[in-house]
Image (cartoon, rainbow, N blue to C red):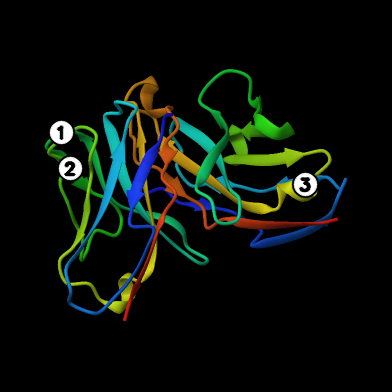
Amino acid sequence: AQSVSQHNHHVILSEAASLELGCNYSYGGTVNLFWYVQYPGQHLQLLLKYFSGDPLVKGIKGFEAEFIKSKFSFNLRKPSVQWSDTAEYFCAVNVLDDYKLSFGAGTTVTVRA
Amino acid sequence: EAQVTQNPRYLITVTGKKLTVTCSQNMNHEYMSWYRQDPGLGLRQIYYSMNVEVTDKGDVPEGYKVSRKEKRNFPLILESPSPNQTSLYFCASSFIGGAGNQPQHFGDGTRLSIL
């Protein structure tokens, strides 16, 4: 079974700082990759996804992620965070043609005003 | 409005008392799934369903049952709940297609406490 690793458990930033969250997966075949965000007390929402094409994908709220196949990575970035980006961020992966999503443990991001 | 609706949102109950958490979606999605979310473990899949009458185990199915008699509904059943099933549960749904790249839509979650 594939596994998904998120390197940072908790990240604390000041507003306007840049954010990068790491995500690595273990499966060597073709995968679909997702980043979800969970704001406090809310359900998960899709930030962005990658399944083919340009490895740099842009999502909502100014987030982007880069797929690096050779490193099995799909890191999430945002150049300048806002207080409202305080949330938990989950990386998720599924194998091509398989709908079972494997999630990372999540990274809690706290942005201080 | 497109949504996944779970009920109840919160439940405190006792060991051994059967309970059902309902999940309903109005997007005509074929795929539905249940996850549990525990601190430090992320979301782990309990069961999933590819369509009506088609269900399969996820990573942590022990102690849970599901059914998919109608396309829109996917209830999660705990026949004899135990304290280790205290968790936050999410139902999700999506279309099938695109080789698995369809994003899942999540419900608001159900927080279960088993005493």
Q: Are marks 1 and 2 on the same chain?
A: yes
Query: Which residue type carries mark 1?
Result: Val
Q: Secondary structure at mark 1?
A: loop
Label 2 crowd bin: few (<14), some (14–19), many (20+), radius 10 Å: some
Residue B38 visible in the picture? yes
Quadrant of res A112: bottom right
Query: Which residue type carries mark 3?
Result: Leu
**Is residue A48 left or right of B113 when viewed as pictured?**
right
> Which quadrant does the C terminus of chain A fall into?
bottom right
Label 3 crowd bin: few (<14), some (14–19), many (20+), radius 10 Å: some
The correct choice, above or below, for A72 with respect to A97 in the image is: below
Name the residue: 58% across, 18% down: A53
Q: CA distance from mark 3 to mark 2?
A: 39 Å
- The chain ID associated with circle 2 is B
Query: Which residue type carries mark 2?
Result: Thr
Q: Position of residue B31 (x, y in %)?
A: 29, 34
- The chain ID associated with circle 1 is B
Q: CA distance from mark 1 to mark 3?
A: 42 Å
Count of marks placed on residues: 3
Residue A63 visible in the picture? no
Name the residue: 65% across, 26% down: A57
**Is residue A50 left or right of A14 when viewed as pictured?**
left
Q: Position of residue A67 (x, y in %)?
A: 62, 32
Residue in front for this viewpoint, A8 or B43: B43
Q: Position of residue A59 (x, y in %)?
A: 65, 29
The correct choice, above or below, for A83 with respect to B112 in the image is: above
Residue B55: image tag: 2
Residue in front for this viewpoint, B112 or A110: B112
Residue to which mark 3 is pinned: A19
Residue B27: image tag: none
Residue to which mark 1 is pinned: B52
